[in-house]
């Protein structure tokens, strides 16, 4: 078998029969070329190592030995392949495979969409231009969806240019996801990290890609020209023709004249002589909208002699602020304050605040703080009226609404009653609950009693009967079961006497308990997770409820008749004089719907009315159906109205 030749880089530098230890290897004395090439390169905006791996020559025997079992290790007829050589060979074969459905990183490898865009940057340090147009190139790499932006360098621009945005996945301005090719169109305004770029044009490959993908490309727009070059050309031509002196040259001449002992023009002497010691006083405040901020009041003095402004703080007692009365020392307050990073740079002409800018009810900016002017003194008000013909009325400022935090009540842990647990949370020393002694003494012997049955749908519970009682002194409710033969339950206490929660009440910060007005014939209550339907009440309960119609509206005959008045009038107009309770129920449902159906307690209230039954009802048989007298239920004025109809 012919041995496989190794490449020159794999020739051993020590005898094969010696171990590879220090002192047993040697360098080739015949080697004369010792290159040390530069491997550090710069690609766009990052550093990279430009080391190219050597290709390994592969043949059939090498591939078979790489895929064979471990027996190749004892074969001494050919050189042994190292792990690095085997890994490099596998990688070389692996890179030659092309799948049917290629992923994006393989299908769009080294494919880049290039857009030409620009944005307008304000220039504040030069008097001859207000803005400058900066052109950029946006590269969208299709293989991984990353975005890279570079700014071409312009000679003598005075602006650091080059890499503008490093390669990474850019987010959409609304934060809904990464920027996709379909989101970039010609003529649109693209926002990246707070800067707005205008996409002007793209290259031919980008146009072809958008056409193949079916994306809308948009219409190219013209790139705006930079005013810096135009102004420079106009300035040179004007100086050559009219011999105008630039502003900086005139200022230098004035400075030289003053340094040589010349007098300087005093343009504001007359203003000082006319308005010395004349000061306008305004009252203002600043709303600190930050966390734990508050409204701070100030007094603003405007000196008419030199148009300077002074602001003093007005702290109330115990405000907790340091006693520094001067907020802004006397100086000219400008509308566009600027601070240059380097001394000597030219600044825009300052725009100070004047008297016509100070208006009651308006706002001024004091170094990015908005001050609201709400009042002024009498001299200031008269000055504006005499010289500017402006009335300065007082501006009523809204009162500060203290937003006091309120803690929610903690949940009940199950120990004691809800009132006891809540009292321990509000006071360090537990206090006894407040009891209505008058109610306790006057209603200690009064209790409402109802008979109820279970309505849980179980057949074995249909015959069970219970007594539901509520003590009016403390609204405690208890349930006792009556004896029922062959029911499997013994008579006695079903629920302990105490306040019961009402699960059907609207949810709130505190639990709701059953009250006396929640109990009536026909109501369904829940005690110990058991639903009870109240079927009747004792005579004392009915009389008590009828004597308190304001608390129990279903037991007030006037309330019931007022609700059923349209139904009774219609029956009376149809010639009906008596009606059974079942017929009255059906008529009420037909007239008022299911929501206005007649409740059992309302029907009991009508039957208990003294004149509800006909006069001859006592002579009828005991098993005769009960009938209600409609003429006796309607009031006299109602009967007259029905007769007129």
Image (cartoon, rainbow, N blue to C red):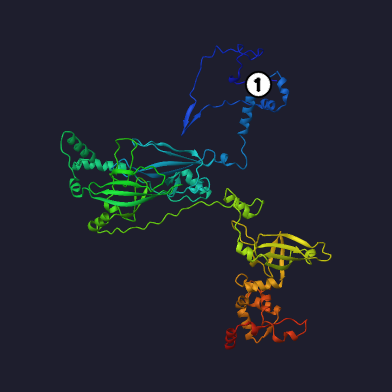
Locate the C terminus by quadrant.
bottom right
Image vertical order of residue 530 relative to residue 249, above or below = below
Q: Is residue 610 found left or right of 155 in the rendered image?
A: right
Q: Name the residue located 62 percent from the left edge and 33 percent from the top edge.
A: 94
Hey, which quadrant is residue 346 in on the image? Answer: top left
Residue 599 visible here: no
* Image location of residue 42, percent across then percent down: 46, 30
Outermost residue toward the right in this view: 486
Q: Secondary structure at mark 1?
A: loop
Residue to which mark 1 is pinned = 4
Q: Nearer the viewer, residue 442 or 541?
A: 442
Locate the N terminus by quadrant.
top right
* Image location of residue 162, percent across then percent down: 41, 36
Answer few, some or many: residues within 10 Å of disc 1's Cα (few below 14, many 20 plus, some between 14 and 19): some
Q: Nearer the viewer, residue 121 or 416?
A: 416
* Image location of residue 258, percent across then percent down: 18, 36
Q: Is residue 155 found left or right of 487 in the rendered image?
A: left
Outermost residue toward the left in this view: 262
Image vertical order of residue 501 relative to residue 253, above or below = below
Q: Nearer the viewer, residue 364 or 472?
A: 472
Q: Nearer the viewer, residue 365 or 496?
A: 496
* Image location of residue 517, percent across then percent down: 64, 67
Q: Is residue 98 found left or right of 128 in the rendered image?
A: right
Hey, which quadrant is residue 396 in on the image? Answer: bottom left
Outermost residue toward the bottom in this view: 644
């Amino acid at each position: 078998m012919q041995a496989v030749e190794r490449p020159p880089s794999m020739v051993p530098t020590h005898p094969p029969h010696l171990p590879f230890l220090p002192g047993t290897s040697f360098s080739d004395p015949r080697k004369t070329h010792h290159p040390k090439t530069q491997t550090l390169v710069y690609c766009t905006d990052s550093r990279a190592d430009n080391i190219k791996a050597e290709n390994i020559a592969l043949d059939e025997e090498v591939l078979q030995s790489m895929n064979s079992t471990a027996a190749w290790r004892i074969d001494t007829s050919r050189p042994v392949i190292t792990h690095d050589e085997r890994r490099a060979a596998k990688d070389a074969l692996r890179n030659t495979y092309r799948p049917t459905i290629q992923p994006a990183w393989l299908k769009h490898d080294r494919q880049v969409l290039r857009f030409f865009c620009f944005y307008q940057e304000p220039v504040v340090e030069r008097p001859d231009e207000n803005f400058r147009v900066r052109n950029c190139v946006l590269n969208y790499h299709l293989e991984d969806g990353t975005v890279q932006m570079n700014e071409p360098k312009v000679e003598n621009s005075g602006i650091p240019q080059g890499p503008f945005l490093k390669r990474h996945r850019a987010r959409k301005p609304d934060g809904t996801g990464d920027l996709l090719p379909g989101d970039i169109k010609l003529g649109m305004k693209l926002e990246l990290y707070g800067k707005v770029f205008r996409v002007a044009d793209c290259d031919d490959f980008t146009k072809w890609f958008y056409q193949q993908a079916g994306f809308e490309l948009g219409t190219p727009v013209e790139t705006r020209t930079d005013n810096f070059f135009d102004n420079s050309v106009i300035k040179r031509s004007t100086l050559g023709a009219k011999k105008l002196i630039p502003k900086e040259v005139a200022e230098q001449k004035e400075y030289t004249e003053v340094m040589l002992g010349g007098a300087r023009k005093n343009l504001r002497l007359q203003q000082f002589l006319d308005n010395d010691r004349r000061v306008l006083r305004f009252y203002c405040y600043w709303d600190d909208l930050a966390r734990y901020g508050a409204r701070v009041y100030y007094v603003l003095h405007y000196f008419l002699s030199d148009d300077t402004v002074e602001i003093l703080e007005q702290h109330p007692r115990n405000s907790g602020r340091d006693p520094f009365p001067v907020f802004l020392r006397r100086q000219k307050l400008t509308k566009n304050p600027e601070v240059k990073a380097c001394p000597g740079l030219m600044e825009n002409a300052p725009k100070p605040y004047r008297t016509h800018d100070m208006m009651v009810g308006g706002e001024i900016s004091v170094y990015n703080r908005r001050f609201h002017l709400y009042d002024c003194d009498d001299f200031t008000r008269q000055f504006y009226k005499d010289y500017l013909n402006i009335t300065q009325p007082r501006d009523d400022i809204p009162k500060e609404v203290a937003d006091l935090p309120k803690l929610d009540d903690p949940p009940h842990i199950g120990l004691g009653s809800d009132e006891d647990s809540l009292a321990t949370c509000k006071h360090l020393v537990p206090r006894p609950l407040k009891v209505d002694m008058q109610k306790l003494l006057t209603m200690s012997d009064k209790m409402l009693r109802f008979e109820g049955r279970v309505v849980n749908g179980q057949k074995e519970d249909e015959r069970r009967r219970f007594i539901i009682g509520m003590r009016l002194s403390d609204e405690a409710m208890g349930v006792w079961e009556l004896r029922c033969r062959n029911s499997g339950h013994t008579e006695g206490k079903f629920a302990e006497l105490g306040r019961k929660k009402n699960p059907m009440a609207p949810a709130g910060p505190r639990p709701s308990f059953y009250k006396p007005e929640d109990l009536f014939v026909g109501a369904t209550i829940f005690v110990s997770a058991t639903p009870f339907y109240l079927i009747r009440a004792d005579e004392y309960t009915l009389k008590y409820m009828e004597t308190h119609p304001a608390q129990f509206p279903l037991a007030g005959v006037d309330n019931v008749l007022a609700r059923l008045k349209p139904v009774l009038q219609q029956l009376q107009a149809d010639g009906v004089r008596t009606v059974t309770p079942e017929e009255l129920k059906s008529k009420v449902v037909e007239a008022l719907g299911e929501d206005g159906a007649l409740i059992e307690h309302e029907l009991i209230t009508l039957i208990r009315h003294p004149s509800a039954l006909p006069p001859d009802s006592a002579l009828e048989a005991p098993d005769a159906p009960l009938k209600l007298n409609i003429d006796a239920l309607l009031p006299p004025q109602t009967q007259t109205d029905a007769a007129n109809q």
